[in-house]
Amino acid sequence: MDIYEINFDGSILKRGFWIYIWTIHTQRDGFLIYAGRTGDTSSPNAQSAFNRVSQHVDPNPNSHSNALARNLRGRGISPESCKFKFTAIGPIENECDTMETHIPIRNRIAALERRTADWFRNRGYEVLGNHPRPGDFDPDVWQKIESELTIRFAKLNGV
């Protein structure tokens, strides 16, 4: 039997549009990166970043929300054998009431997700998952995200 602790600030429970990064350390492949976002494709919902934590590593093979776990298993890596670090930036925008207001924000956040994944790729990190094609985003928001990425991920020293 082992004992684990998770500490977090309650602010990560806020619903809205977030960018998040998983740093995954595997025995076989070393460090891998997974970049994601909140903001549903099929509804005006934008859940909290914290909600995505358990969904992404859900061991249920029928889950549709466990993209990180599926990517790892697709490489022959058991998520249970990895060490994870989860970093969330946001909320960048508030959750919307209608699809008409949701879609343009979701698309801008998706472009930031892609930009985040490319930031890691350009630094030689292997990034898991698919990311939408680049699109329009707020350059001021990207500058803030990039600054945080530079501070936290310029050199990965462990998870």
Image (cartoon, grey):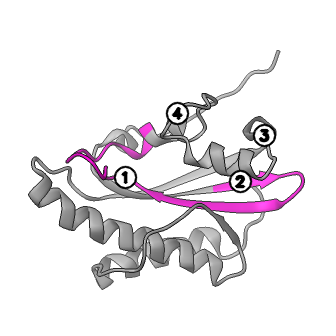
Q: CA distance from mark 2 to mark 4?
A: 20 Å
Q: Earlier in the sequence, mark 4 or mark 1?
A: 1
Q: Nearer the viewer, residue 73 or 149?
A: 73
- In the picture of the structure, the residue carrying the numbered disc 1 is 38
Whole-percent x and y of residue 98?
A: 10, 50
Q: Earlier in the sequence, mark 1 or mark 3?
A: 1
Q: Are marks 2 and 1 in contact (CB under 8 Å)?
A: no
Q: Residue at 32% x, 76% y: name it.
A: 141
Q: CA distance from mark 3 to mark 4?
A: 16 Å
Q: Secondary structure at mark 2?
A: strand
Q: Residue at 60% x, 28% y: name it.
A: 60
Q: Earlier in the sequence, mark 2 or mark 4?
A: 2
For label 2, the crowd category at 10 Å Cα-Cα, with few meaning under 14, some 14 to 19 and many 20 or more, is many
Q: Which residue is at the far front?
A: 62
- In the picture of the structure, the residue carrying the numbered disc 4 is 63
| Quarter that holds the N terminus | top right
Q: CA distance from mark 4 to mark 1?
A: 17 Å
Q: Secondary structure at mark 1?
A: loop
Q: CA distance from mark 1 to mark 3?
A: 24 Å
Whole-percent x and y of residue 85?
A: 64, 50
- In the picture of the structure, the residue carrying the numbered disc 2 is 24
Q: Are marks 4 and 1 in contact (CB under 8 Å)?
A: no
Q: Are marks 3 and 4 in contact (CB under 8 Å)?
A: no
Whole-percent x and y of residue 16?
A: 27, 50
Q: Secondary structure at mark 3?
A: loop
Of marks 2 and 4, the one in the foreground: 4
Of marks 1 and 3, the one in the foreground: 3
Tell me, yes or no, whether the highlighted magenta stretch contains residue 125: no
Q: Is residue 26 left or right of residue 105?
A: right
Q: Residue at 71% x, 53% y: name it.
A: 24
In the rendered structure, which segment of residues is drawn in magenta?
A: 23-51
Q: Earlier in the sequence, mark 3 or mark 2?
A: 2
